[in-house]
């Protein structure tokens, strides 16, 4: 066989590879069975008798020490030596420690315990794989052996084990018991089932080489899941197109055969130890590795390319980020996990808190829930800044909230996930109206012009008199306001803090793609002022809504310029004054037309709000 340098390869393990040993169902009364063939692909056992436990020869000790492994005794050292030499983890049992001389590879029982060789007790569950006898587990498969089956000075007959386990299961088991070993780190990467026999034959060879015992010329080989031979069609043209080369078929075959990849009838057959070769791209990679990356010529892209553009949601997020950063905000990133304590500290409504999704394997109690609201996450960061004596803070975060609506998660469905813009701020010259202005700027930037701002008194995370909802139709797209004093006390913040939650998912729904062009007006505007006296509880939003509706689409703008309170106008009364601008795009409005509109506005305000004109 020719390899990389065109030289004949002399196999140093030819005696092992060609060793034909009789397979038996029983050796010295020992039997093996696999009850979990989905987790154990192959299990080979060989028996060595007349064992003499003692120190290993110096050459073996030195080689093990150079690899960072402590010498224990000759039998254990052989298993470690073979693992390092051939990549196959092994284990050795004292045959007398195996009750009933019956080795069973099975799933552990719930709550089953085993004391491992490091003298630590480990609790297992049904997902873990164990090597057991008729009464007990004697090893955690692929991780570590049990103290109850270790090789002792008086041991006279040894069972060598060479097995191949499911890599994913070994990784989970090692993580579960908190024990990652040289053995588990190799199994979890995936091993070839065909290498198990070679490794155990090598171990037995070493036993006889150092005079540690006499091997019985037989093996127990339980092999329920034969390793698949990967066969890949050798398509020369496709490989050349993929690599941008012009390599001949014969040159490809020569490269592959040097790597022990046989080619028969245009089919590349991967050797047993190359389980990573699964498709044509893998074969192409092997070809180019030895053909030479330096020989690849620079070529133009032949495939058609697509122009990457942002979708509507991405465009809106970009606009919002630019707007807020230009207004002095800093963007933060927060975890999507919270604890029950976080929800309680933020006074989150019980109904909303129940929609939080419980994580099955949380990192800690602080990250036990998927957050149903972003308020706790923002409050944590604001509290951190306040604790560090930062006097003026303006933060925003675009992240997701997760809500378990009608138990979708329990039914295997995806929970409600919404993108939320969270704004948090405190400092000098910041109040409710400052925050409201930023929210209006966000709405304007996303081309949303028709919305209502309604007072909100039921949200316990916010101050009951300084909180509002932004609504479009029946949808609430935002909540803004001053944080409730109780919440501030919970987070040890002594300043007034303002929060806003804007539902970007809903914002995208109502956002117009493009702004509507409005031509420069040709006719002059007419401006009138109006001041009315209303009850203290009347919101200015209600007044503006009535004014707009009563203006016959001629109202161009309504600007609130004064709110006045005094005993002279009555208790629980206030005067609200607006500057109104009217314009008709087709003609100049006359005084008579404006007077009729103003009269209609006053009548509607009187009828619906019991307002009186202030004179």
Image (spheres, rainbow, N blue to C red):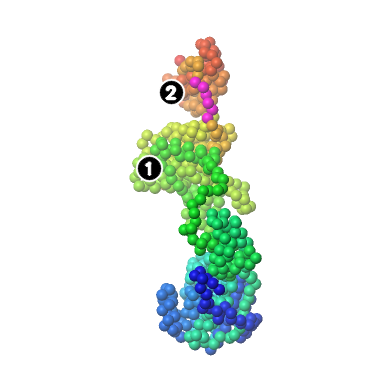
Q: Is residue 224 magenta?
A: no
What percent of the width, then of the height, locates residue 128?
57, 68
Q: Which residue is mark 2?
A: 561
Q: Residue at x 55, y 33 (%)?
A: 512
Instruction: Identify the element where label 2 is drawn.
Output: strand
Range shown magenta: 515-520
Residue 563 quadrant: top left
Please say if 591 is above or below 110: above
What percent of the width, then of the height, locates residue 204?
54, 82
Is residue 107 at least partly visible in the picture?
no
Q: Depth-wise, is mark 1 or mark 2 nearer the camera? A: 2
The local crowd at label 2, few if under 14, some if 14 to 19, many if 20 or more residues have their Cα within 10 Å, is: few
Is residue 47 at least partly visible in the picture?
yes
Q: Which residue is mark 1?
A: 494
Q: Nearer the viewer, residue 224 or 463?
A: 224
Q: Nearer the viewer, residue 213 or 401?
A: 213
């Amino acid at each position: 066989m020719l390899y990389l340098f065109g030289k004949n390869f002399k196999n140093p393990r030819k005696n092992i590879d060609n060793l034909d040993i009789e397979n038996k169902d029983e050796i010295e009364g020992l039997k093996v069975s696999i009850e979990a063939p989905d987790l154990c692909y192959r299990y080979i056992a060989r028996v060595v008798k007349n064992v003499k436990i003692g120190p290993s020869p110096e050459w073996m000790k030195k080689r093990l020490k150079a690899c960072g492994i402590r010498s224990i005794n000759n039998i254990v050292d052989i298993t470690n030596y073979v693992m390092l030499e051939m990549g196959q983890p092994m284990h050795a049992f004292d045959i007398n420690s195996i009750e009933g001389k019956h080795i069973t590879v099975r799933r552990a029982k719930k709550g089953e315990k085993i004391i491992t060789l490091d003298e630590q007790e480990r609790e297992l569950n049904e997902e873990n794989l164990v090597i057991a006898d008729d009464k007990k587990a004697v090893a955690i498969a692929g991780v570590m052996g049990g103290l109850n089956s270790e090789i002792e000075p008086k041991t006279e007959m040894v069972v060598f084990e060479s097995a191949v386990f499911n890599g994913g299961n070994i990784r989970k088991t090692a993580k579960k018991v908190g024990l990652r070993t040289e053995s588990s780190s190799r199994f979890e990467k995936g091993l070839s089932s065909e290498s198990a026999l070679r490794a155990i034959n090598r171990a037995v060879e070493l036993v006889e080489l150092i005079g540690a015992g006499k091997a019985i010329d037989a093996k127990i080989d339980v092999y329920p899941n034969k390793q698949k031979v990967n066969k890949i069609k050798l398509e020369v043209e496709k490989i050349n197109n993929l690599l941008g080369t012009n390599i001949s078929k014969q040159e490809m075959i020569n490269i592959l055969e040097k790597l022990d990849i046989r080619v028969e009838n245009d089919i590349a057959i991967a050797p047993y130890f190359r389980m990573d070769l699964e498709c044509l791209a893998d074969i192409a990679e092997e070809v180019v590795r030895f053909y030479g990356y330096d020989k690849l010529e620079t070529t133009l892209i032949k495939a058609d390319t697509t122009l990457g553009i942002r979708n509507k949601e991405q465009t809106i997020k970009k606009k919002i980020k630019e707007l807020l950063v230009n207004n002095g905000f800093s963007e933060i990133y927060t975890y999507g996990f919270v604890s029950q304590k976080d929800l309680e500290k933020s006074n989150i409504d019980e109904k909303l808190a129940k929609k939080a999704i419980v994580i099955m394997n949380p990192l800690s109690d602080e990250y036990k829930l998927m957050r149903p609201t972003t308020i706790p996450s923002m409050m944590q960061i604001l509290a951190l800044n306040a604790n560090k004596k930062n006097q003026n803070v303006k933060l925003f975060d675009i992240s997701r909230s997760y809500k378990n609506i009608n138990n979708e998660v329990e039914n295997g469905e995806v929970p409600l996930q919404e993108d939320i813009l969270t704004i948090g701020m405190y400092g000098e010259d910041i109040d409710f109206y400052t925050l409201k202005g930023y929210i209006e700027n966000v709405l304007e930037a996303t081309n949303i012009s028709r919305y209502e701002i309604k007072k909100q008194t039921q949200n316990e995370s916010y101050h009951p008199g300084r909180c509002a909802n932004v609504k479009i139709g029946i949808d609430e797209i935002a909540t803004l306001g001053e944080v409730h004093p109780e919440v501030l006390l919970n987070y040890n913040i002594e300043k007034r803090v303002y929060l806003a939650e804007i539902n970007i998912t809903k914002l995208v729904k109502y956002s117009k793609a493009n702004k509507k062009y409005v031509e420069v007006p040709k006719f002059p505007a007419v401006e009138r002022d109006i001041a009315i006296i209303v009850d203290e509880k009347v919101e200015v939003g209600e007044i503006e809504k009535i004014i707009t509706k009563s203006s016959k689409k001629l109202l161009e703008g309504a600007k609130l310029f004064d709110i006045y309170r005094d005993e002279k106008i009555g208790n629980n009364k206030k005067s609200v004054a607006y500057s109104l601008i009217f314009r008709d795009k087709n003609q100049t409005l006359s005084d008579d037309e404006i007077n009729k509109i103003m009269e209609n506005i006053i009548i509607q305000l009187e009828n619906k709000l019991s307002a009186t004109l202030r004179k």
